[in-house]
Image (tube, coloured by chain):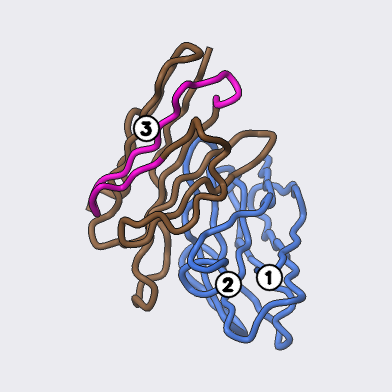
Chain colours: A blue, B brown
Amino acid sequence: LAKTTQPISMDSYEGQEVNITCSHNNIATNDYITWYQQFPSQGPRFIIQGYKTKVTNEVASLFIPADRKSSTLSLPRVSLSDTAVYYCLVGDKWGNQGGKLIFGQGTELSVKP
Amino acid sequence: DAGVIQSPRHEVTEMGQEVTLRCKPISGHNSLFWYRQTMMRGLELLIYFNNNVPIDDSGMPEDRFSAKMPNASFSTLKIQPSEPRDSAVYFCASSPQRGSRYTEAFFGQGTRLTVV
């Protein structure tokens, strides 16, 4: 299981771009990087997944450098509703440890008005 | 599909009572996970089923906890007897078969359990 390290918490203001970086120094060749988002009182939900370079969808962008030892989740122009915990997972496309889905502590993002 | 459905949404019970949490995964998903979330311990994986078979139950805290998946559309998590320290939000999640073009796991709304 590739160990991931991400900041425990981050603060931002509405309208700003937020970048959350996850370190995964021992990522394996076949590993993907997946991010989940958890709003208060809800279960986590998938937001983006990538293998290398850059992936963008309607919610976020994921930047992965060539060495893949880290990745950055970018949220453009955040709003109060982006306040949530963001989890970085490294493993195959469907899980990060033999088919299981293991979550670390995540990054608690607080967006202020 | 209505997503992963958990019931009940809230449960308040007295210490010593049996509690049963229920989960209906998304049709066609063959992996099912039960999680427990608390402020202190975060999101913990309790047990993982694949094709209705328990693959890894190493996260189950103790013998008071048991989980079953009698068929592909239903799973239960039972706590007997319940204790105040079991108070938490319990989530069920399902994900597609490995190798599927779809990769994301879907979580239910959770069951908030309070044991008094």
Q: In the visual, does B29 lie left or right of B112?
A: left
Tell me the number on the disc at residue A91: 2
Residue position marked by numbered label 1 in the rendering: A2
Q: In the visual, does B101 lie left or right of B82?
A: left
Foreground pick, B103 / B81? B81
**Residue type pointed to by label 3:** Leu
Q: In the visual, does A76 lie left or right of B22?
A: right
Residue A46 drawn at (x, y percent):
47, 59
* Helix, strand or loop status at disc 2: strand
Q: Residue at x 48, y 34 (%)?
A: B65
* Alpha carbon separation for disc pair 2 and 1: 7 Å
**Residue type pointed to by label 2:** Gly
* Helix, strand or loop status at disc 3: strand
* Alpha carbon separation for disc pair 3 and 2: 29 Å
- Please rate how many residues cluster around mark 2, counting C-alpha atoms within 10 Å: few if below 14, some from 14 to 19, many from 20: many
CB-based contact (under 8 Å), mark 3 and mark 2: no
**Chain of the residue under label 2:** A
CB-based contact (under 8 Å), mark 2 and mark 1: yes
